[in-house]
Amino acid sequence: MNLRKRFSDQRGFNLIELMIVIAIIGLLIGVGSIAWGAMIKAGNETAATQVLDRMRVFQAQYASSNRGRFGTFDQLIARGALDAQYAGDAPVVNGYIFTMEIIEPSSSAPASYKIWADPQVSTGITATGNRFFFTSSALGGIKAKEGEKANENDPSI
């Protein structure tokens, strides 16, 4: 008899209370995932600008010891300036695709380079970045544009 009374006195959550708790947890996860995505994009963009800035320095160092010629990603890796993850023609690092154009010197113009950093995915929930970046041997900084490929006419960051 005592055992039956103990079981009938136990109280717990009813279905409505459980549904409210689950809804609150779902809301917190939803808000947290949006903030997490924004934080990842901002981190990727910051990393891309830092890499472009370092590449400008590495290109200047490479040119000073190679009669004014600039190096490709693979040549900069061989010199120890870049990590191996930048190997190839269009390496993808931290959600950004890096591309480089090297222009050899001619009788009328010195050697030059152009480097772009474009997000792998630029729109939607899975976007790895919103801004596109550009630098070149003719610039003293980095240019940025939101939504499409950046060039020398875009605003500096």
Image (cartoon, rainbow, N blue to C red):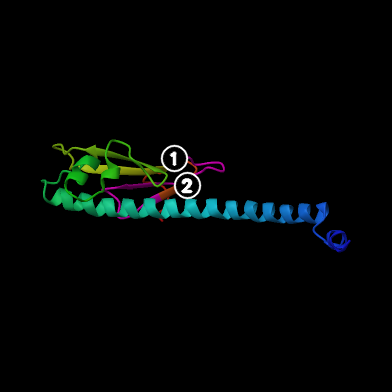
x, y percent for residue 31: 63, 54
Query: Which residue is rendered at x = 15% and y = 36% of the image?
Result: 106
Q: Where does the image place residue 55, in percent across and percent down from the top left?
A: 27, 50
Q: Main secondary structure of the magenta part?
A: loop
Closest to the observer, 9 or 64: 9
In this rendering, would 14 be left or right of 103? right
- In the image, what residue occupies the spot 71% across and 56% down? 24
Residue visible at 77% across and 52% down?
A: 19
- Dot 2 corresponds to which residue? 129
Q: Earlier in the sequence, mark 1 or mark 2?
A: 1
Displayed quadrant of residue 84:
top left
Residue 125 falls within the magenta-colored stretch: yes
- Residue 120 in which image quadrant: top left
Please state, as top left, top right, bottom left or bottom right, where the C terminus lies in the image.
bottom left
Mark 1 packing: few (<14 Cα in 10 Å), some, or many (20+)?
some
Figure quadrant of the N terminus: bottom right
Q: Are marks 1 and 2 in contact (CB under 8 Å)?
A: yes
Residue under label 1:
120
Give the label on residue 81, or none.
none
Total count of labels: 2
Identity of the amino acid at label 2?
A: Gly
Q: Residue at x 18, y 40 (%)?
A: 109
Confirm whether the magenta stretch covers residue 146. Answer: no
Q: What is the span of residues highlighted in magenta in the rendered image? A: 120-143
Circle 1 — which element?
loop
> What is the distance, in whole Å, between disc 1 and disc 2 at their CAs?
8 Å
